[in-house]
Image (cartoon, rainbow, N blue to C red):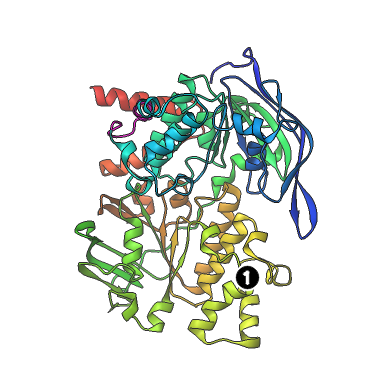
Amino acid sequence: MKDTAAKPVLLTMRDVRIDGHSEEVWSPIIKGVDLTLHKGEVLGLIGESGAGKSTLGLAAMGFVRDGCRISGGTIDFDGIDLLAASDAKKRGLRGKRIAYVAQSAAASFNPAHKLIDQYSETPVQHGVMSEQEAHRDAVELYRRMQLPNPDEIGFRYPHQVSGGQLQRAMTAMAMACRPDLIIFDEPTTALDVTTQIEVLSAIRNIVARFDTAAIYITHDLAVVAQMADRIKVLLRGNEVEEADTRTMLSAPKEDYTKSLWAVRSYARPTQPPVRKGTVPVVAVKGVTAGYGQVDILKNINFDIHKRRTVAVVGESGSGKSTAARVITGLLPPRQGQVLFNGKTLPPDYRKRNRDQLRQAQMIYQMADTALNPKLRLRELIGRPAQMYLGLNGKALNERVRALLDLIELEPDTYIDRLPSELSGGQKQRIGIARALAAEPQFIICDEVTSALDQLVAEGILKLLDRLQGEFDLAYMFITHDLATVRAIADEVVVMQNGRVVEQGPKDQMFQPPHDPYTELLLSSVPEMDPDWLTRLLEERAAKAAG
């Protein structure tokens, strides 16, 4: 990590207090936090969901979300008082001298405009360069961000590039005006490990190249170890501790920080082998499927048994989610079939009977978008029980309350809340309860912990494990997080380019020898070592050269 203490101070935040508004009551979110950032320095902000990381990061721009207010303290950016500055003054800074990179690039780009036009908008509006100059600059930054075909990729629409490419394009867009400060808000959370390496490397290189200061917000401790010069730990709006990265990793002072470091210790007990001849709950047999004329899945086979969790891993575009769509009947296969308890399922969900639909449920990655924001929890959880089990009135109410108990949320407290009144982890628990409401035998868990901090994610994994044992459930666990695979899986299916390249029991899959692609995935999992990314990139460069 570089020494930036001798450089001028760029950002100073003193005793910053931020409140949130709910039901006509203001409650504290940030409770008197200090922050100092030097030019060219990267500060990592970590902490569990609800700690105030994103709120503090946005405040560094003099900005708060709707329903929030800055109630005290000072925020000074390079001699400019952001709390006293006019809206026009702050608009002049944002994009030009202070930029923001959001967690979800897919949700941040305008789908109706090409990447290069969206890149050019900010420098042209701020008078930094002409549109023609901005287009040339975009190509140069796309090249620095190691995007494929940098001369052409900007002329694609957001939906025509992968998630990792879109994240790098957004980082390039943030750099368009060569800002002094960038706020990175969980920029690699939704990316697979191989894509994450590319994005982290590109971010680190471009920040160093232009001596840009950054606040890097994340719940992934191994990632922040690669990116930050210093780390600040937050808990429920309070600062826990702060130190340079090496000190924080090797000798954290506070018990809470130590608990973050130790959180990945959970692993479910090893299950006995499945008896020969046992009929799997779900069997995928020789499935080929795709969109239009393009095959995404190519003759894939795997089984999922009762009380077993099969983790399906692979980088973006490998076919994991497409396999889930085939199993649920949303995408009929061109060849092959899906069997449920030994009986062939109709390939199209519209031809499946109600019981067949009931038996397979999904828990989605983004609980924020998966839950109807206008419905209260009693309706969100109750609808599947009403639809599939015919429950109404008192019986339905009792079922909803029992499900809230199962997911460890107090029914009297939560049953009439809206999703907006829940934390990220609580929303994901509601997604689990909604899936259980139909009393299925099989649940597809689609990246259900990727957007959660490590403490909350561990709680979700333990909950899923407990429920599996109680209800004899079979899980298909789609994930790009190999630490999650180690914690929850019984068996692993590795996919690449629509094919199953390796599969077997978890313990066997994590022992060499591996398929070269499996080896690539395993070597791409970040470690709690500040030198890990540098060492990995050097090893891969040497291998490529020789």
Residue drawn at x 67%, y 45% as measured from the top left: 51
Q: Where 495 falls versus 90 (above or below)?
A: below
In this view, the residue farthest toward the top is 6
Residue 524 in sight in this render = no
Residue 518, given in percent of the width and then of the height, sits at 31, 44
Residue drawn at x 35%, y 63% as measured from the top left: 324
Residue drawn at x 46%, y 47% as measured from the top left: 190
Residue 331, given in percent of the width and then of the height, sits at 30, 67
Q: Is residue 146 magenta?
A: yes
- The crowd level at tag 1 (other Cα within 10 Å; few <14, some 14-19, many 20+) is many
Q: Is residue 454 left or right of residue 203?
A: right
Element at label 1: helix
Residue 388 in sight in this render = yes
Residue 104, given in percent of the width and then of the height, sits at 48, 46
Q: Which segment did they paint magenta?
A: 139-151
Locate the C terminus by quadrant: top left
Pick the residue in front: 302 or 51. 51
Q: Where 29 falls versus 462 (above or below)?
A: above
Residue 505, given in percent of the width and then of the height, sits at 35, 56
- Quarter of the view holding residue 99: top right
Instruction: Say which residue label 1 marks.
Output: 377
Pick the residue in front: 150 or 250. 150
The three-letter amino acid code for the residue at tag 1 is Leu
Q: Is residue 12 magenta?
A: no
- Quarter of the view holding residue 14: top right
